[in-house]
Amino acid sequence: MKIHLVRRATIDEFGLKNAQSRTSLEEWLTKIKNADWENPSDILATFRSADLLGNGSSRVVLDIAGNNYRIICKYAFGEKQVHLFVCWMGTHSEYDKLCSKNAQYTINIY
C-alpha cells in the first residue's frame, strides 16, 4: 500500500531550521513516496536502520543523515493506504533524552 504522510510541513519546517538535514530528508521523502508497505516489517525493508517501538505503540524510529537526526512516526495500516504521522523530530542527543524519560512512546507534536 502507498504511504500517506500526514503533515509533510513538519518535515519541511525541520529542514529549514536544520539546513544540514535537508538532503537526507529529501532522500527520506523519496523513499516514503516510492514505498509499498503491507505490514510493519515492510517499514524495516525500506529503512534498514529503523526501530519498531514495542508496547503496542505502532511507532517507528527512523534515522536521518547518518543517525544525526531521529524521527518518531506513528503508523496506521488502512484498507487502501498506510497513514504515517510524524510525531517528533530532533537530534540524536535529543532523542536520547526522550528515551531516558521513556517518553518516546507518548510524545506527539500535534
Image (cartoon, grey):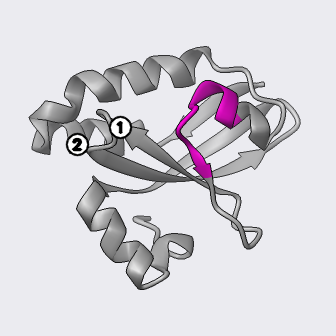
Q: Where residue 27 sits: x, y (%)?
A: 38, 19
Label 1 secondary element:
strand
**Mark linked to residue 64:** 1
How many residues crowd mark 2 within 10 Å: few (<14), some (14–19), many (20+)?
Answer: few
In the image: residue 11, left or right of residue 5: left
- Residue 85: x %, y % from top left: 55, 50
Q: Residue at x 64, y 61 (%)?
A: 53
Amino acid type, residue under disc 1 in the picture: Ile
Q: Is residue 55 above or below residue 83?
A: below
Position of 36 with respect to 62 (left or right) is: right
Q: Residue 58: percent from the left, percent from the top? A: 70, 59
Residue at the spot of label 2: 13
Q: Earlier in the sequence, mark 2 or mark 1?
A: 2
Quadrant containing the N terminus is top right
- Hey, which quadrant is residue 55 in on the image? bottom right
From the viewer's perspective, is the residue at label 2 or at label 1 nearer?
A: 1
Instruction: Identify the magenta region.
Output: 43-51
Q: Magenta includes 47?
A: yes
Q: Amino acid at mark 2?
A: Glu
Real-space Cα distance between discs 2 and 1? 15 Å
- Front residue (pair 106, 4): 106
What's the residue at 64%, 20% (across, down)?
35
Front-lying residue, 94 or 110 = 94
The residue furthest bottom is 101
Which of the 4 image quadrants contains residue 65?
Answer: top left
Residue 58 counted in the magenta span: no
Q: Quadrant of residue 9?
A: top left
